[in-house]
Image: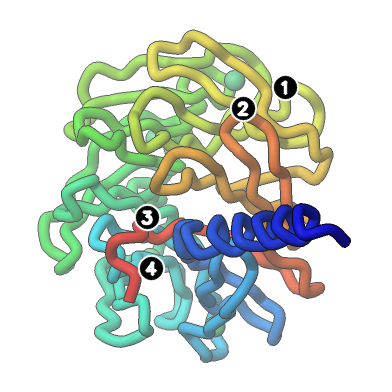
Amino acid sequence: MSLLDGFASTSVLLAVGFSLACASPASTIVYSSDSDGDGDLYMLNDDSSEKRRITNNGSDEWDTACAPDGLTIAFTSDRDGNYEIYVMRIDGTSVRRLTNHPSMDINPEWSPDGTRIVFESERDGDRDIWLINPDGTGLQQITFNDAADGGPDWSPDGSLIAFQSERSGHFDIWTMTPTGGDPRSLTNDTPRDFSPSWSSDGEQIVFLSDRDGPMELFLIHPNGEGLQQLTHTSADNHEPDWSPDGARIVFASRDGVIRVIGADGTGLANLTNNGGMDRSPCWIPTKGKP
Ligand SMILES: [Ca+2]
Ligand SMILES: [Ca+2]
Ligand SMILES: [Ca+2]
Ligand SMILES: [Ca+2]
């Protein structure tokens, strides 16, 4: 090896080391797994490292929603007999039940300022969208039709809530104001469209649709334009959630695996693959990492 070759190799090694040292620290995902028999919540870095358990009980915990403070999560549990909405610190402490109703209360998501939680409930006889404060006060219904409304997600500027509704006779993606005003459909067709999630810049919404066969992820602009298919996994995907930096989307699949994909469609990777049913991933805002 010549001196020049040695120098070049050292430079490469230094460059690799430098890029690793400068890579942003792994961000964290909360998810539910039934790997020990019932749904419990876990934390996992987005490079699959440092799995940590949050809940450990015989009830079913799922439907995670990571709060904008990076320190709190909302989730759904049947620990008190039927599905209710709860909040707790991401270390598993300070658990608080928000809802208390014999009907199913599921699918919580936070307002961007963290002062409200939007969720889906059947307490009105059919699925509708409701709001509640993180301290359990301020319950408010914002959809009132007899069709199924659900899967809400708040826009990053706080001005709109995206959701799924069957009010046109088929499941479509809609937006409305946080008081239920100005409902607009982004899709209007017979394929089933579910589970919208806003990008951090508010420019795109990822959602699920069976318009290409199995449930795949699609992107659309909030004005209903620019529909494009993001995944071609044939894994029957669900529950997409956008990364805080807008670069990636985490989602679950019916095979029990949680996956990530770049918002440009590249970089599909498995995050979990433990034989259990892993679902309900949410991405913790990095700045609030404990
Ligand atoms: Ca449990
Ligand atoms: Ca309930
Ligand atoms: Ca309804
Ligand atoms: Ca549709």
**Label 4 is placed on what type of residue?**
Glu
Binning the other alpha carbons within 10 Å of mark 3 as few (below 14), some (14 to 19) or many (20 upward) gives many
**Label 1 is placed on what type of residue?**
Arg
Q: Nearer the viewer, mark 2 or mark 4?
A: 2
Instruction: Say which residue label 4 marks.
Output: 84
Measure the alpha-carbon separation of dots 1 and 3: 26 Å
Instruction: Say which residue label 3 marks.
Output: 108
- Front position in the image: 145 or 20: 20
Ligand 2 lies under 8 Å from the Cβ of mark 4: yes
**Label 2 is placed on what type of residue?**
Phe
Quarter holding ligand 3: top left
Measure the alpha-carbon separation of dots 2 and 3: 21 Å
Instruction: Say which residue label 2 marks.
Output: 218
State which tag comes first along the sequence, 1 or 3.
3
- Evaluate if marks 2 and 4 touch, with contact meaning CB atoms under 8 Å apart: no
Helix, strand, or loop for circle 2? strand
